[in-house]
Image: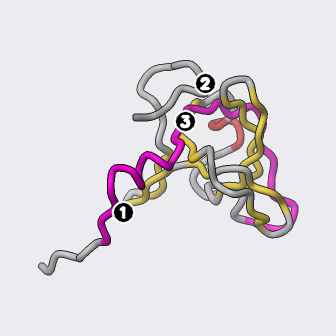
Amino acid sequence: MEQQLEEKITIDEFRKLKLKIACIKEVVDHPQADRLYVLQIEVGGINKQIVAGIKSSYTKEQLVGKQVVIVDNLVPALLRGVESQGMLLATQDEKGLCIIMPERETTTGSAVK
């Protein structure tokens, strides 16, 4: 099996990412996309909105109240007409999508290191 060559980054480039713990407060269907949710989250006392393509793997009820890892310092982007103010981190394998979550409840806004 061939090993895929990946571009390397420096530790200084990695430090530019602000990975933080957020709590999902509300989940609604995206008004213009079948596979997207619009999440209202709280990050260290600040409310934000994130659009995430996780609808096929999670119900709204499974998400509300969960703590997740987000990229908090992305430039806001319009995703099918709805602003997303960050990115939820997840992985996907042969079993499906899996959101990255802390193993125990922690303070929202905490930095992921």
Q: Residue at x 58, y 30 (%)?
A: 67
**Which residue was labeled with disc 3?**
20
Q: Rounded to the nearest whole Å, what is the CA distance between mark 1 and mark 3? A: 27 Å
Q: State the residue position of label 1.
A: 94
Q: CA distance from mark 3 to mark 2?
A: 7 Å
Looking at the image, residue 91 lies above or below residue 81: above
Q: Badges 1 and 2: C-beta atoms under 8 Å apart?
A: no
Q: How is the image coloured?
A: secondary structure
The percent coordinates of residue 89 (x first, y second) are: 52, 49
Amino acid bearing label 3: Lys
The residue mark sitting in front, 1 or 2, is: 2
In terms of secondary structure, where does tag 3 sit? strand
Q: Secondary structure at mark 1?
A: loop
**Image location of residue 104, percent across then percent down:** 45, 21
Residue bearing mark 2? 108
Look at discs 1 and 3 and give the one toward the viewer.
3
Residue pictured at 80% horizontal, 69% vertical = 80
Instruction: Give the camera-side residue of 33 and 20.
Output: 20
What residue occupies the far front of the structure in this picture? 12
Q: How many numbered discs sit on the rendered protein?
A: 3
Q: Which residues are magenta?
A: 7-34
Q: Are marks 3 and 2 in contact (CB under 8 Å)?
A: yes
